[in-house]
Amino acid sequence: MNNSRANVRLPPEVNRVLFVRNLPYKITPEEMYDIFGKYGAIRQIRVGNAPDTKGQAFVVYEDIFDAKTAYEHLQGFNIMGRYLIVLYYQPNKVTKKMNLAKKEEELRELKTRYGISEDD
């Protein structure tokens, strides 16, 4: 990291991992590297190939500033007639939802086990 960036404060949601949605299903990994690699060194790209993850990808940059630049330039970018949706990956949001669902399920099981109805 060079010194001009050392004191820059980034918003808390900014990180090195971008979550990209609305990708053309036929996009190749090479095309992904061509598009996202223009903004900096990429550590990894994972393109969804399951029915529920098609058209989505995670792009991991080596440098957080490169991820920020890519985010700013590629949001709404048109590829093969589709406009990209680029977000910063926020794992805590995903796990929070999963944890909440798990806690609700545990609560239902306890209520059932101890014969507590929803009306009590």
Image: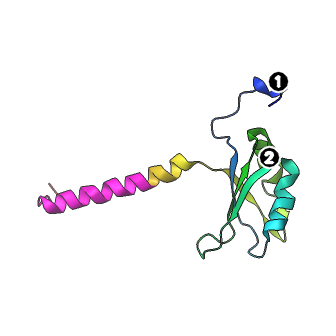
- Image disc number at residue 3: 1
The magenta region covers 98-116
Which residue is rendered at x = 72% and y = 56% of the image?
Answer: 44
Upstream in sequence: badge 2 or badge 1 = 1
Quarter of the image where the C terminus is located = bottom left
User: Magenta region, mostly helix, strand or loop?
Assistant: helix
Q: Which residue is mark 2?
A: 72
x and y, in percent, of residue 83 in the image:
78, 63
x and y, in percent, of residue 102 in the image:
35, 57
Query: From mark 2 to mark 1, how far is it between C-alphas?
Result: 22 Å
Q: Say left or right for 52 vs 117.
A: right
Colouring method of the image? rainbow
Q: From this viewpoint, is residue 101 visible?
A: yes
Query: Which residue type carries mark 1?
Result: Asn
Dot 2 lies on which element?
Answer: helix
Say which of 61 and 79 sits in front: 61
Which mark's residue is nearer the viewer, 2 or 1? 1
Q: Is residue 16 magenta?
A: no
Q: Say left or right for 20 vs 90.
A: right
